[in-house]
Amino acid sequence: MADGLDWYCAQVLPGHIAVDVVCETDDVLAFRPPVPGFGAEHIIVIPKQHVRSLLELDADTAVKLLAVQQTVAAEVIDRHGGCQAITSIGDEQHNRHLHIHIAAGEGVARFVQRAPQVPDTQKPGRPNRPAEHDG
């Protein structure tokens, strides 16, 4: 695990740093960080209880965290057509509190090349599906 603070428990959750709250439950907070990290839209989802990393996440907290992540991601997809949900583990994790970045739009790193898109007529407002290829 990389050296660093649990900035979320030390600063965000106690309210020492003002953030734009997107969604909040008793157990999970989703917010826009004060300084966006990447993408035209950047939202961070965290458990309110301290969880050091994905490797230490218990099943009950995982369900609650994923439910908020799904809600936030659906809203971002409605605005941008797609998004990425990313977390880091081990030496790649620079903050000692589990956090998921939901990012969309210009500035988001692309890990794979996008496939050609065709309209998805079955789910208005949802992302397009990759075009089917003959042969």
Image (cartoon, rainbow, N blue to C red):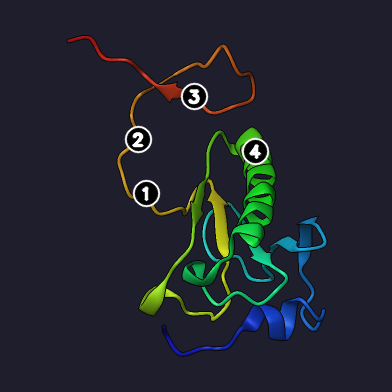
Picture quadrant where residue 3 is located: bottom left
Q: Could you tell which of marks 2 and 4 lies nearer the N-terminus?
A: 4
Q: Which amino acid does label 3 sit on?
A: Asn
Vertical placement of residue 64 versus 52, above or below: above
Of residue 47 and residue 127, the one placed in the foreground of this image is 47
* Residue underneath mark 2: 114
Pointer 3 or 4: first along the chain: 4
The residue identified by callout 3 is 128
- Between 107 and 68, the one lying in front of the other is 68
| Number of residues whose C-alpha sits closer than 10 Å to that of mark 2, classed few (under 14), some (14–19) or many (20 or more) | few
* Residue at the (59%, 38%) spot, across then down: 80
Determine whether, in the image, residue 100 is placed left or right of residue 134: right
Q: Residue furthest front?
A: 59
Residue type, numbered disc 1:
Arg
The Cα atoms of the two marked residues, 4 and 1, are separated by 19 Å
Q: Distance between the residues labelled 2 and 3?
A: 11 Å
Q: Which of marks 4 and 1 is nearer the N terminus?
A: 4
Say which of marks 2 and 4 sits in front. 4
With 87 as the anchor, is 46 left or right in this view? right
Identify residue for label 1: 110
Q: Dot 1, crowdedness within 10 Å: few (<14), some or many (≥20)? A: few
Give the CA distance from mark 2 to mark 4. 19 Å
